[in-house]
Every structure is written in C-alpha cells, then in structure tokens.
Image: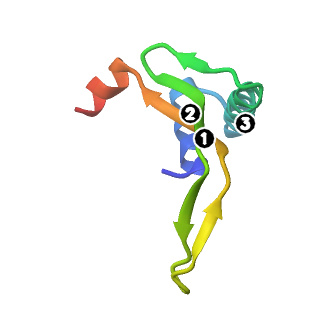
Amino acid sequence: MNKAELIEEIAKSADITKASAARALDAVIDAVTETLKKNDSVTLVGFGTFTVGERAARTGRDPRTKEPIKIKAARVPKFKAGKALKDAVN
C-alpha cells in the first residue's frame, strides 16, 4: 500500500474527503517526525512506539572496489510494534 492508497482507506473508513484524510495523515507524519527530531518517542498504545536509536560508527566495504570505508555514527528512527498490532498480523 502506498500513501495515496492509505489516504483513500482513511477517507473511506472515517467517512471524510480524501483532501481531509491527506491533511490528517500529513499532520500525523509531521508530528511524529518533529517529535523524533527532538530525540523524544511517540507511543500509540496497541499500535507501537517510534523512537530514535543510535547507530555506532563502523567500518564497511565498498562493494565495487572492496576497499574498506568508514561509516559515521548516526541517529536512526526505530519502530517497535505493539501487542495489538502483533496479534492482528498473526
């Protein structure tokens, strides 16, 4: 499912226009992004938790030349599924 299909599903499920659904989805995405930028987490009970993790610096390998390269440390977004989402999938 892509973003357009998700907007269509939200509009149908909530009985709102696609434009309203698109604005709502964009607002949720923006809110989660801004919260993660502040190094905070977002918990949606039953769905899951978005957090920011630290990835350590490491040495990788260039696949073309096989030369070792240094990969910098980075902050990365993470998602841990909640129990209700896990149960729904299984």
Mark 1 and mark 2 in contact? Answer it, CB < 8 Å. Answer: yes
The residue drawn where x is 60% and y is 41% is 7
- Lower position in the chain sequence, tag 1 or tag 3: 1
Label 3 crowd bin: few (<14), some (14–19), many (20+), radius 10 Å: some
Amino acid at the residue labelled 3: Asp
In this view, the residue in front, 43 or 4, is 43
Secondary structure beneath label 3: helix
Give SS at disc 1.
helix
- Between the C-alphas of marks 2 and 3, the distance is 12 Å
| Residue located beneath label 3 in the image | 26
Q: Which amino acid, mark 1?
A: Ile
The quadrant of the image that shows the C terminus is top left
Q: Residue at x 54, y 35 (%)?
A: 78
Q: Is 5 drawn above or below residue 59 in the view shown?
A: above
Q: Identify the residue at horizontal 69%, vertical 34% (top origin).
A: 29
- Which quadrant would residue 54 be assigned to in this image? top right
Residue matched to label 1: 7
Q: Residue at x 76, y 31 (%)?
A: 37
| Camera-side residue of 18 and 45 | 45
First in sequence: mark 2 vs mark 3:
2
> How many numbered badges does the structure rendering display?
3
The CA distance from mark 1 to mark 3 is 10 Å
Q: Which mark is residue 10?
A: 2
> Disc 1 vs disc 3: Cβ atoms closer than 8 Å?
no
